[in-house]
Image (cartoon, coloured by chain):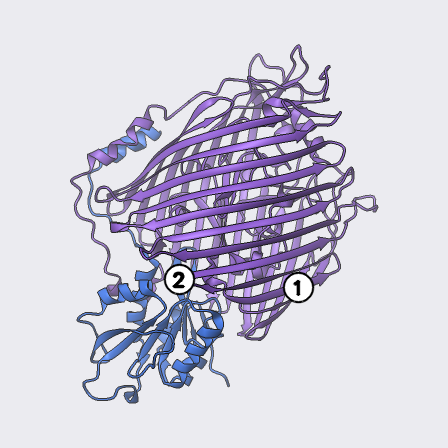
Amino acid sequence: MACALAGLALAATGARAQRPEASEASVKAAFLYKFAGYIEWPPTAFASEDSPFVLAVMASDEVATELARIVPGRVVAGRPVTLKRVRDGEPLRGVNLIFVGRLEASRLQAVLRAAQQQGVLAVAESDRGLELGAAINFVSINDRVGFEVSLDSAEKSGHRISSRMLTVARRVIPKAS
Amino acid sequence: MTFIDRLVIIAVMSAGFPGRHVILRGCAALAALPLLAHAAIQVAQAPDLAELSLEQLTNVTVTSASRRPERLTEAPASIFVITGNEIRRSGATTLQEALRLAPNLHVAAIDNSQYGVSARGFNSTTANKLLVMIDGRTVYTPLFSGVFWDAQEVMLEDVERIEVISGPAATLWGANGVNGVISITTRSSAQTHGTLATGYAGNQERGGAIRHGGAFGDSGHYRVYARYLEIDANRVATGTSSRDEAERKQVGFRADWKNAGGDVFTVQGDAYRGEGDNITAPRSFSGSNLIGRWESKGEGGASSRLQAYVDRTDRDHAGTFGETLDIFDVEYQRTSHPLTAHTLVWGAGYRRADDRVRNSAGLAFLPAERTLRWGNVFAQDELALTANLQLTVGVKLETNPYTGHEWLPNARLAWQLSPDHLVWGAVSRAVRAPSRLDRELFLPARAPFVVLAGNDTFESEVANVAEIGYRAQHSTAASYSLTAFAHRFPNLRSVEPSAAGPILGNGIEGRVHGVEGWGTWRLNPHLRLDAGFVAMGHTFKVRPGIVDLRGFSALGNDPKRTAIARATWDPTPRHEVNFTVRHVGALPDPAVPSYTTLDARLGWHVSKSLEISLTVRNAANRNYAQFGTLAARAERERAYLVRATWGFL
């Protein structure tokens, strides 16, 4: 039977390989770009009519590298998208959405809080990212990347998230009543 | 039942045929052919992920080419993954109990220390057809090709995932992966910064652990941990104590860092000590290990991995046997894409064991001191035949100190019916090479060997396996996996008469067949249901011309049915509730009645850094036993424990 399989393999001629498979960083980068289209961006988030939409990445070279491939030529909320790499401690002026990679939990919490206070929608990839203050958090289960949403945190940073996005989320923390 | 009782029973088992290469011998050469045949394949177009919808993105399989376990998870095979979060929410306090989450494993405890763990049959406390690894370190003993489960612990809070593969996975993983592989992976120390302390106490056990992690240098991370547990004795059926109180202590560390080129280095190690009593005699054990690993990602998705470790185990079973075992192991693996649509994995490994057994009057491993060496080379190619058809062919050549060399080939075909539906089939030849027990065990220690004499002609046990499987994902809410399998064993272990006394041979033919499946249904963001089952059967017969003295029950003691169902519910963002129902069918010999048991856990995140939980096991409080003889096996009563965990989980 094995020989039959191998023979079959040789007989078949190749076409292109297109299994849905990619690196974790590239999937997260694609998610980050897609998220932007499901979020209501308050007009106050932009300094002027022609301010770009600023996507920032902290503490993840891999995701920043993948995003750099995606964003050229893309438009969010009618504005061109630009990518900004920020370091821990740098101000977030002009940033609309920030992805924070793996940081020590207490540092992560501080960064997420600062983002929330400055009206920046924050995305994390920590096991307890939502509890630490992220509006969106990536979770990886069985080799697939999913995400969870805290409507409470999103509201605090001044954002509304579309219900279509919530149906795909693995977990949704409701607004604090 | 002590280890040695078990040895005697096994001893009184099977007979010998030279290992036969039944299929695939000619196909080993074919394995290399696809590499040459498909140079002209069109350029693969990576899907533009940014064009996918959110739903589609959640279905993209994530691969990390440098790491074998993740590659295998998306391979066409029967794989169940236990996540660290599921372990936490199960309330498990030991690694062995956490393994019960995998529907494709039969986990059976005689008492607190003696466990039988197997996939697809042949279970016993000396089950020998499973490969078990903790962070790449193979933990089965060359003494009997099985695992002393009492000595295998990890800091459960640091476990990233446990992959349980049922069926052979020998090409990439190694011999002994005949019926399955358990691979336990802990998190990188980059993910375990800060301090975590956890403690629990209940009516039957107490324990705790502390871990601290942080950063060093520009890109380095580290953690250190210590854990302790003690378990009280249970009772046997007559109501007297099963005397199986147990105590285990363990410390360890892990450091990960990168160099300027992005290569990842890991150094980790553990040291442990423990003891456990049982109805016949106490046992104690200690050990330590040190692992070094280098992983490098190159251009175009290529990656390399080099790992080496030393592992010492000391073990003493009062009055019967003692052992000091030193292992040295090194392996190299490279993954590359030499041609479009091909993924080639190849590598080599070397393993050396210095085994020093302290014999007793009742039994002897002769010679008492032995150095054993194994080596292997392997290659596997994954080839995209069409947009949705993928072929994997691989072969491993392994040398062992007893039978020289063995070939382990496999071929797998995966057909992606749609992005969410996969059909796969596989044929494999797997081999369990002889252990010291098979060839060098004498009972009693001096002639005449009325129970068992060593036999230096015992051959490798061979398995020829065919599998067919189906995996499906329905939206993001439901997914399931079904696998049908048939294993043929031409030369299982028998016990045969000889002039020197009974000897182990390869005189039993066996067939094992069945189906296994599991699925997940996410009803809403707050409630998830998981269920799984195995239904299997076997037939054994003694080969013509062979006299078997012991009977088939020596091969293992297996239920025909097992099933598990779990509910994972988050009633509020701060509360979590879990229910688990497990059913294990009756075992034939020694007879153990079937049982169904309910476990529950309630967790409460009091604050961002404090979690309190209550776990109840065997909530219905029906006493039941899992394995072993009526006189020796512990019966389980209702157990509860309260746990507090402080830190960032």
- Of residues B613 and B266, the one nearer the viewer is B266
Work out whether B66 lies above or below B631. below
Work out whether B54 lies above or below A96. above
Label 1: which residue? B199
Label 2 marks a residue whose chain is B
Chain B image colour: purple
Q: Is residue B541 left or right of residue B230?
A: left
Residue with the most extreme top position: B499
> Residue visible at 35% across and 51% down?
B421
Amino acid type, label 1: Gly
Classify residue B204 by image quadrant.
bottom right
Chain A image colour: blue
> Residue visible at 70% across and 22% down?
B443
> Residue visible at 43% across and 47% down?
B293
Q: Position of residue B463 (x, y in %)?
A: 48, 29
Residue at disc 2, secondary structure: loop
Label 2: which residue? B219
